[in-house]
């Protein structure tokens, strides 16, 4: 009966888009990209700041949860934007995220800002690379033009 219902098109697809499902766990690579930090920096913060302690899966890989992302948002702002030292941050977060920093922990636009910065840096690098290529091409064209002019002079001298 189920097959006949599907065949008649009476049952609509209940597929859920992958993007509709919230992600529960993130790898260190994904977190590194989200926060525009090298993986070794994330591991260093984990060693130095006890409030950041992602679990590890059976394979021993770090698995970051939303709780860890909240902590990382605060760390990123305190360490990178406010220029606090590791010791200052360790003291400040000794008992968890204080109430006055909750707004940072919940601000998911932080990842978006860093993604935009990363994209801008990539575009700048691409532009510089293309500019270098154009410069090289211009130099090559000038060299060829100079060579052609010299050849014209030599040919003119031969015909004279």
Image (cartoon, rainbow, N blue to C red):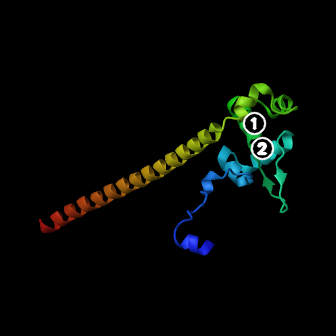
Question: Can you give x and y, in whole percent of width and height, for residue 84 in the image?
Answer: 76, 29
Q: Is residue 142 above or below residue 113?
A: below
Question: Can you give x and y, in whole percent of width and height, for residue 92 in the image?
Answer: 83, 28
* In this view, the mark in front (2 or 1): 2
Asked whether disc 2 touches disc 1, contact meaning CB atoms under 8 Å apart, the reply is no
For the point 18% across and 66% down, the residue is 155
Mark closer to the chain start, 2 or 1: 2
Query: SS for tag 2?
Result: helix
Which numbered tag is attached to residue 130? Answer: none
Horizontal arrangement in the rendering, residue 95 relative to residue 42 (left or right): right
Horizontal arrangement in the rendering, residue 33 relative to residue 122 (left or right): right
Residue 83 visible: no
Q: CA distance from mark 2 to mark 1?
A: 10 Å
Name the foreground residue: 14 vs 8.
8
Horizontal arrangement in the rendering, residue 57 relative to residue 79 (left or right): right
Which numbered tag is attached to residue 68? Answer: 2
Residue 11 visible: yes
- What count of labels does the image hold? 2
Query: The C terminus is located in which quarter?
Result: bottom left
Furthest-top residue in this view? 100
Which numbered tag is attached to residue 75? Answer: 1
For the point 87% across and 40% down, the residue is 50
For the point 28% across and 58% down, the residue is 145
Query: The N terminus is located in which quarter?
Result: bottom right
Question: Can you give x and y, in whole percent of width and height, for residue 148 in the image?
Answer: 25, 62
Name the foreground residue: 146 vs 89.
89
Question: Badge 2 local density, few (<14 within 10 Å), some, or many (20+)?
Answer: some
Q: Classify residue 104 by image quadrant.
A: top right
For the point 78% across and 53% down, the residue is 63
Name the foreground residue: 89 vs 7.
7
Q: Is residue 159 above or below residue 107?
A: below
């Amino acid at each position: 009966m189920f097959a006949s219902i599907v065949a008649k098109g009476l049952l609509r697809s209940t597929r859920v888009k992958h993007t509709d499902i919230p992600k529960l766990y993130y790898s260190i690579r994904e977190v590194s990209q989200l926060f525009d930090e090298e993986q070794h920096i994330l591991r260093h913060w984990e060693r130095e700041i006890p409030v950041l302690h992602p679990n590890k899966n059976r394979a021993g890989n770090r698995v970051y949860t939303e709780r860890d992302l909240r902590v990382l948002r605060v760390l990123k702002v305190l360490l990178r934007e406010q220029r606090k030292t590791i010791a200052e941050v360790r003291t400040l977060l000794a008992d968890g995220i204080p109430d006055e920093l909750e707004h940072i922990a919940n601000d998911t636009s932080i990842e978006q800002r860093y993604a935009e910065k990363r994209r801008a840096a990539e575009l700048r690098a691409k532009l510089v690379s293309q500019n270098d290529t154009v410069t090289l091409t211009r130099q090559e064209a000038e060299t060829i033009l100079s060579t052609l002019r010299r050849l014209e002079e030599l040919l003119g001298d031969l015909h004279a």
